[in-house]
Image (spheres, rainbow, N blue to C red):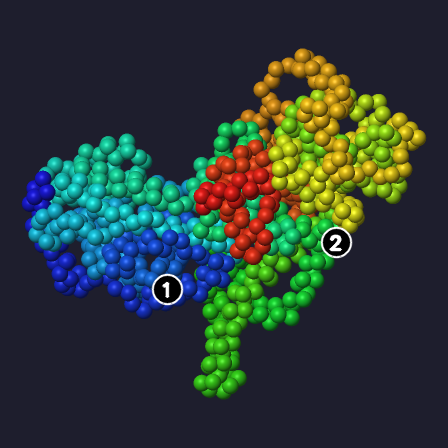
């Protein structure tokens, strides 16, 4: 069969291939790299570090030696930036040949630039496979590397598009090229296909990060025999036979058509081809598709993509003590994103609620034109109010102004402001073009500025050679200072902008009140602070309630005479520490009323939650008892910390508390402390067997629980939860939960509806309001809704993490990445939100599960 395929090839094709292999004639010259390749790559070397904070190279060991013929196949999501990243960061600085349309070579100027840059002309109108790829074949025969984007174009979609088959055709036709050139015989080729991914954490965002990642090379041995077992499809017209057969019924089976329309869709499409050559090409393309998908993060839709990004930013946010920015390394970016997406898309109400809350939060960030890290820093800088946060940022900026003015004064407009304005004017519709325009325009303007500075320096020194050296050194120094200081300066500018807006709007209690889940809220200060006692009273572990340390201002705790529990009395100057419990059902409150008896009365108060305290379900507090002693649950609320919480003044209203009503004469004049109760008396309340001396305290509670169970209607909805809204109706519910302002609710609905199927760029955010008026960025109700959305997203993510077993693989990956982020900043590796000590301990004691 192999010999038949060779003998069946036309003599003209064989002669052409032989001539091409010999390299005779100007037309058959091997593509080479000239001065323009060096210029183009240098532009990438200088411009990429200005826009991106870092570009990491991963799995470089998979790249074959520089002498190996290679076809580099990469995803294509960021237009010319992808080309620049490949050219500037490919291992060994190996030059890469790119394909270019034949039409670009008609103009002598562009032809000179493209030829000198090593680009290969491809005329897709050519129906002969060997002629179509002859430039590619000559480059590979000389040991060159070809870089292709098999998706066929640059896309902004949340997944890798179906690959076109051109790369597979080129690789396998090269084997036929060698066969024809050698005069027959089955030929094995050393060419390899290298799956490559160019990944960004936020590709259009200034100072985002990039990743160039390589997969294991794909050798062609498994495909060549099948491919060469039949004549080339392009041979049929040369023999003057019947018209060309449409293998799939619609598209002629040529490489030209494959690069335009045919895609790989799995084994079924592979088997649908009649020709063995087409089946080999389809199999290779399908394997390449899987390899590139394994290197990238692919979400099923924009809602999941945005929710995953928001979850990643919340988990890897700030170290609470030092406010150090924690970000997962880019080499772990894809794996971390996949694990988070897996948690958000699994079956269950917790996953659905978390995904929706995170998506709404992502939409609110775009609506308010702010990023999560800036918001987190401003919140951390404002422990006692928005004024303190603004003043802290102003002071930090003022201390750096003596450096920033000379460094950024000359470069502010050409390097930063002008490129942004040009990009948002000409490329605002396409996210994949924003960073390209910003980078290239910034390079042009900045190069002009630097050239002017060098010329001006030489003019001052009367055009002497030392003046040239001084000018070059000054430009290099200015550029280096810009690169080393831009991240801090840019961060402070964003914090100043947001801090000013928050200080003017002063969103406080209204936003805090809306961060809580549906259900009733209560403040516990005595025996019910103990999570096991609370679970015993409400009849469940309390997975549906959220607990956070808090302070009640204007109250004091006293011992009840002859008892182990306290009584709360309102006083003008006292403060009581305890827990704010939200999400309680009416049935829970009935059991609590029975437990407290007639010595207490429920009253409504305002409570001050500790913003640095974890919000976790009661079940998690019970599970963490082994690593976090229960008597220490309120230990963080020292006198100094309580004063700070009081000064911050973020009050949660509509909270109920059990106040003492049986008379002051039954109270002792000494303050009751929970830690003493937990160490010395709690075992008699929640112990087993003889230890449970106070089991009689629960008899009335048990009777109430039995009555509730007997009368409760059967429902599939868990306690404290509401059935998930169907379709997109949940967006309406989410908007209502974030704000009572009708205009803000409408804005939230518009943005969420728009970004559920569109990229998250400001063009689509603005488009959502046409012809409506967009709310002011300093609108107090809008900023209050943003804070509420952030807290709801954190609560939902915390609930999802709490519901996962400590030894789950997804948690192992996330916690290991979190620990490495802490270690990279020389910080103590210890549990941080949203992970529990038990989850951290399970991962750290089983290193084999760490990535």
Residue, x 23% and y 41% (percent of image)?
281
Q: Position of residue 487 (x, y in %)?
A: 56, 60
Q: Residue at x 58, y 27 (%)?
A: 724
Callout 1: SS: helix
Task: Looking at this view, name the residue that lies furthest to the top.
Answer: 710
Report the number of discs. Answer: 2
Seen at 53% across and 40% down, the residue is 842
Nearest the viewer among 222 and 745 is: 222
Residue 298 seen by the camera: yes
Judge whether 581 appears above or below 232 on screen. Answer: above
Q: Nearer the viewer, residue 601 or 685?
A: 685
Residue under circle 1?
Answer: 40
Q: Seen from this angle, which residue lies furthest front?
A: 690
Q: Is residue 355 visible?
A: no
Relative placement, left or right, of 460 versus 259 is right
**Can you give x and y, in whole percent of width and height, for residue 779 in the image?**
69, 45
Q: Which residue is mark 2?
A: 387
Expressed as whole percent of the image width and height from the top left, the position of residue 133 reads 21, 52
Marks 1 & 2, CB-CB < 8 Å contact: no
Compared to residue 822, the image places residue 286 above or below, namely above
Front residue of 285/260: it is 285
Comes first in the chain, label 1 or label 2: 1
On the image, which quarter does residue 666 sit in? Answer: top right
Q: Is residue 699 left or right of residue 312?
A: right
């Amino acid at each position: 069969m192999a010999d038949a395929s060779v003998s069946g090839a036309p003599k003209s094709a064989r002669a052409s291939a032989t001539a091409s292999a010999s390299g005779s004639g100007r037309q058959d010259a091997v593509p080479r790299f000239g001065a323009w390749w060096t210029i183009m790559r240098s532009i990438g070397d200088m411009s990429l570090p200005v826009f991106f904070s870092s570009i990491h190279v991963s799995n470089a060991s998979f790249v074959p030696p520089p002498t190996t013929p290679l076809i580099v196949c990469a995803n294509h999501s960021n237009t010319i930036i992808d080309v620049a990243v490949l050219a500037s960061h490919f291992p060994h600085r190996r030059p890469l040949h790119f394909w270019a349309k034949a039409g670009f070579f008609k103009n002598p100027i562009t032809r000179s630039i493209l030829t000198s840059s090593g680009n290969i002309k491809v005329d897709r109108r050519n129906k002969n496979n060997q002629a179509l790829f002859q430039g590619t074949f000559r480059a590979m025969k000389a040991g060159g590397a070809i870089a292709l984007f098999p998706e066929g174009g640059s896309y902004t979609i949340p997944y890798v598009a179906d690959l076109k088959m051109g790369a597979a055709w080129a690789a396998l036709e090269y084997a036929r090229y060698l066969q024809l050139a050698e005069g027959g015989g089955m030929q094995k080729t050393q060419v390899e296909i290298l799956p490559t991914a160019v990944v960004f954490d936020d590709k259009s965002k200034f100072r985002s990060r990039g990743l160039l990642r390589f997969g294991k090379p794909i050798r062609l041995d498994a495909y060549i025999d099948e491919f060469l077992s039949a004549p080339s499809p392009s041979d049929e017209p040369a023999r003057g036979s019947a018209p060309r057969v449409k293998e799939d019924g619609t598209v002629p089976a040529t490489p030209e058509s494959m690069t335009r329309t045919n895609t790989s869709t799995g084994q079924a499409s592979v088997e649908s081809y009649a020709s063995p050559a087409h089946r080999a090409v389809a199999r290779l393309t399908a394997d390449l598709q899987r390899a590139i998908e394994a290197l990238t993060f692919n979400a099923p839709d924009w809602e999941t993509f945005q929710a995953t990004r928001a979850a990643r930013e919340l988990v890897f946010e700030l170290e609470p003590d030092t406010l150090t920015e924690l970000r997962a390394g880019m080499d772990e970016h894809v794996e971390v994103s996949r694990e988070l997406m897996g948690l958000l898309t699994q079956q269950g109400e917790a996953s659905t609620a978390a995904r929706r809350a995170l998506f709404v939060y992502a939409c609110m960030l775009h609506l308010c034109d702010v990023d999560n890290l800036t918001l987190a820093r401003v919140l951390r800088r404002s422990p006692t109010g928005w004024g303190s946060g603004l003043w802290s940022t102003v002071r930090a900026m003022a201390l750096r102004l003596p450096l920033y003015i000379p460094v950024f004064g000359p470069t502010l407009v050409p390097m930063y402001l002008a490129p942004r304005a040009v990009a948002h004017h000409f490329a605002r519709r396409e996210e994949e073009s924003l960073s390209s325009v910003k980078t290239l325009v910034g390079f042009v303007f900045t190069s002009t500025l630097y050239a002017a500075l060098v010329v001006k320096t030489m003019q001052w020194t009367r055009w002497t050679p030392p003046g040239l050296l001084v000018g070059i050194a000054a430009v290099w120094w200015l550029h280096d200072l810009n690169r080393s200081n831009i991240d801090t300066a840019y961060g402070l500018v964003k914090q100043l902008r947001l801090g000013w807006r928050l200080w003017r709007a002063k969103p406080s209690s209204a936003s805090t009140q809306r961060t809580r889940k549906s259900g009733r809220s209560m403040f516990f200060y005595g025996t019910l602070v103990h999570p096991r006692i609370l679970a015993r009273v409400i009849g469940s572990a309390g997975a549906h309630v959220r607990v956070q340390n808090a302070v009640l201002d204007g109250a004091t705790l006293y011992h009840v005479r002859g008892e182990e529990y306290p009584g709360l009395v309102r006083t003008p100057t006292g403060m009581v520490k305890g827990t704010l419990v939200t999400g309680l059902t009416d049935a829970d409150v009935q059991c609590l009323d029975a437990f407290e008896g007639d010595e207490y009365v429920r009253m409504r108060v305002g409570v001050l939650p500790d913003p640095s305290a974890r919000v976790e379900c009661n079940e998690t507090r019970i599970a963490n008892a082994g690593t976090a002693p229960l008597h220490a649950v309120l230990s963080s609320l020292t006198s100094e910390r309580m004063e700070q919480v009081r000064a911050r003044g973020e009050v949660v209203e509509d909270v109920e508390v059990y106040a003492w009503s049986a008379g002051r004469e039954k109270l002792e004049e000494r303050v009751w402390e929970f830690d003493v109760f937990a160490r010395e008396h709690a075992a008699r309340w929640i112990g087993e067997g003889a230890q449970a001396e106070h089991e009689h305290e629960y008899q009335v509670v048990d009777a109430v629980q039995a009555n509730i169970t007997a009368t409760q209607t059967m429902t599939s909805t868990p306690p404290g939860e509401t059935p998930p809204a169907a379709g997109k109706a949940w967006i309406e519910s989410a908007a209502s939960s974030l704000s009572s302002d009708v205009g803000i609710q409408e804005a939230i609905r518009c943005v969420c509806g728009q970004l559920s199927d569109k990229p998250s760029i400001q063009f689509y955010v603005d488009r959502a309001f046409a012809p409506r008026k967009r709310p002011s960025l300093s609108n107090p109700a809008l900023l209050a809704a943003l804070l509420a959305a952030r807290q709801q997203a954190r609560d939902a993510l915390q609930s999802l993490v709490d519901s996962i077993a400590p030894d789950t693989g997804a948690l192992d990956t996330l916690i290991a990445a979190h620990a490495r982020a802490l270690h990279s900043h020389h910080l103590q590796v210890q549990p941080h939100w949203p992970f529990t000590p038990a989850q951290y301990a399970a991962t750290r004691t089983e290193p084999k599960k760490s990535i």
